Image (spheres, rainbow, N blue to C red):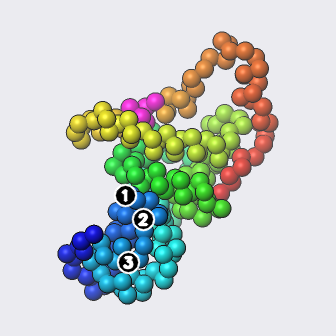
């Protein structure tokens, strides 16, 4: 691996950002196993000692890199994570959030899939800033009069994120330019909204046992994710 010809920033935060950006590239290319302090330092154009000053261990570097992906996700999809006011569920643009997430996934497919696998394997996913707000907002939505009863927040959150992060695999094979990427992001958001509004199965055309299985959770059961 050739060392990047990058002039090392004098500012400590700028140096940290350069190191994290290099770690993101390795994460997207090789997954967490491909991240090491020496490899990241080489790619960032800093010496290994400097990398160790910012991240004492490889594990800390991987943890911070995943958190960096979460921050980028949050800003691209939901806005400023430091905004003082909590978003009102009733005022959330569902189509816009879905479209933003689809477009970010199309622009960063490898990063998104690695991030999701790390979150799913985490002992406490709620420690992640994006998962906490994304799943938490679904949990808050499930308690409003807008929601169908009995939503399983964890399952629904994972299903929708998996759909967003797998969509780019198909989209890449069917888009040739920026305009087509925009159109594909719209298509995904349109269909996700349609599914939420109407579902895909007519209850009057399927066996009663199937309908019963879909509604077996008590309507007043609290969602499992109440963050």
Magenta residue span:
187-191
**Tag 3 residue:** 38
Q: How many marks?
A: 3
User: Pointer 1: residues within 10 angstroms few (<14), some, or many (20+)?
Assistant: some
Which residue is rendered at x = 43% and y = 47% of the image? 101
Which residue is rendered at x = 80% and y = 36% of the image? 218
Residue 160 sits above or below residue 59 on the image: above
Residue 34 tag number: 2
**Helix, strand or loop at disc 2?**
helix
Query: In whole angstroms, how far apart are the C-alphas of marks 3 and 1?
Result: 16 Å
Q: Mark 2 vs mark 1: which is more N-terminal?
A: 1
Q: Is residue 186 left or right of residue 162?
A: left
Q: Say whether marks 2 and 1 touch (CB < 8 Å).
A: yes
- Can you see residue 122? yes
**Helix, strand or loop at disc 3?**
helix
Q: Is residue 225 left or right of residue 36?
A: right
């Amino acid at each position: 691996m050739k060392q990047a010809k990058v002039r090392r920033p004098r500012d400590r935060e700028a140096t940290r950002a350069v190191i994290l950006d290099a770690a993101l590239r390795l994460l997207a290319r090789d997954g967490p196993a491909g991240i090491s302090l020496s490899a990241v330092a080489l790619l960032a154009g800093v010496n290994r000692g400097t990398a160790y000053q910012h991240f004492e261990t490889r594990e800390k570097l991987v943890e911070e890199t995943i958190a960096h992906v979460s921050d980028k996700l949050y800003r691209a999809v939901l806005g400023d994570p430091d905004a003082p006011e909590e978003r009102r569920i009733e005022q959330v643009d569902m189509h816009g959030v879905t479209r933003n997430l689809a477009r970010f996934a199309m622009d960063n497919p490898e990063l998104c899939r690695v991030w999701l696998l790390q979150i799913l394997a985490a002992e406490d996913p709620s420690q992640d800033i994006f998962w906490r707000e994304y799943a938490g907002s679904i949990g808050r939505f499930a308690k409003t009069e807008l929601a169908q009863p009995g939503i399983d927040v964890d399952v629904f959150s994972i299903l929708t994120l998996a759909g967003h992060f797998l969509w780019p695999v198909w989209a890449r094979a069917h888009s040739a330019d920026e305009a087509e990427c925009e159109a594909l992001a719209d298509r995904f958001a349109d269909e996700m909204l349609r599914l939420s509004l109407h579902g895909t199965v007519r209850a009057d055309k399927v066996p009663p046992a199937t309908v019963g299985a879909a509604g077996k959770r008590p309507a007043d059961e609290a969602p499992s994710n109440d963050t």
